[in-house]
Image (cartoon, rainbow, N blue to C red):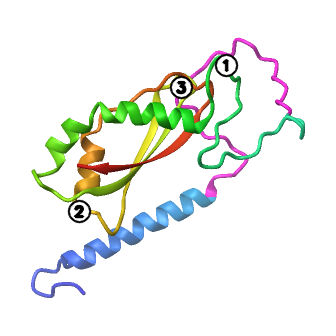
Amino acid sequence: MADEKSGRISTQTAILIAGALVAGGLFFGLRAMRPSEPAAPQTTAVATNPAPLPAPTVLPSQASPPLQPGQASSATPDPTASTKPDVVASDARKELEKQRAALVKACFEPGAKKVKITLNFTFGADGKQITRGVTEDRETGRDGAGRCVSDKLDPIAVPPPGANTYVEIPWELP
């Protein structure tokens, strides 16, 4: 392994030895740590209330089932707000139509065939967009159309539904 002419080891051998030393150091260093020893804190915090807080309890009658697409959550509903996904989807569609001309201009050539896309949104209880997704129909899709719409579409807002609401909106462009 050693270069017989100069009495030094080759680069590959040096890398191999260094890697073995690092691996051995990690192995024995981590092995020496006891699991019960907490790691040293990065910052020091002063507790303002040293008494432990009781754990929250949720009774089975209070537990809510997981949300399904098109279903609104029931957290603190506003009685004047609409949590119906159909109403929220209609409001979202109106907001999307305001951006149609700009999206067509940015993402489609004149005379381009129609592309069917589905936009899905989650709106917070305040009506602001939390998440958005865009999917293209395989049969009518055009390379890059969904990506362009996703990139160029500005965030939208709807009247406050009173709870987080998920909607899917089928849309055709141009």
Residue beneath the point at 42% across and 42% down? 132
Residue beneath the point at 56% across and 38% down? 86
Residue type at mark 3: give it: Thr
Indicate the quadrant where residue 117 lies. bottom left
Within 10 Å of disc 2 (Cα), the crowding (few <14, some 14-19, many 20+) is some
Task: Tell me, yes or no, whether the two marked residues, 3 and 1, touch with CB atoms within 8 Å.
Answer: no
In this view of the protein, which residue sits in the foreground, 170 or 62? 170
Please state the horizontal and vertical placement of residue 73, each as a whole percent of the image. 67, 35
Element carrying mark 3: loop
Residue beneath the point at 71% across and 32% down? 74
User: First in sequence: mark 1 or mark 2?
Assistant: 1
101 on left or right of 16: left
Residue annotated with mark 3: 43
Marks 3/1: CA–CA distance = 41 Å
Marks 3/2: CA–CA distance = 53 Å
Please state the horizontal and vertical placement of residue 36, each as a whole percent of the image. 73, 47
Residue annotated with mark 1: 78
Q: Is residue 63 above or below residue 56?
A: below
Please state the horizontal and vertical placement of residue 148, each as a whole percent of the image. 23, 49
What secondary structure characterizes most of the magenta part? loop
Of tags 3 and 1, the one toward the viewer is 1
Of tags 3 and 2, the one toward the viewer is 2
Residue annotated with mark 2: 142
The magenta-colored residue range is 32-57
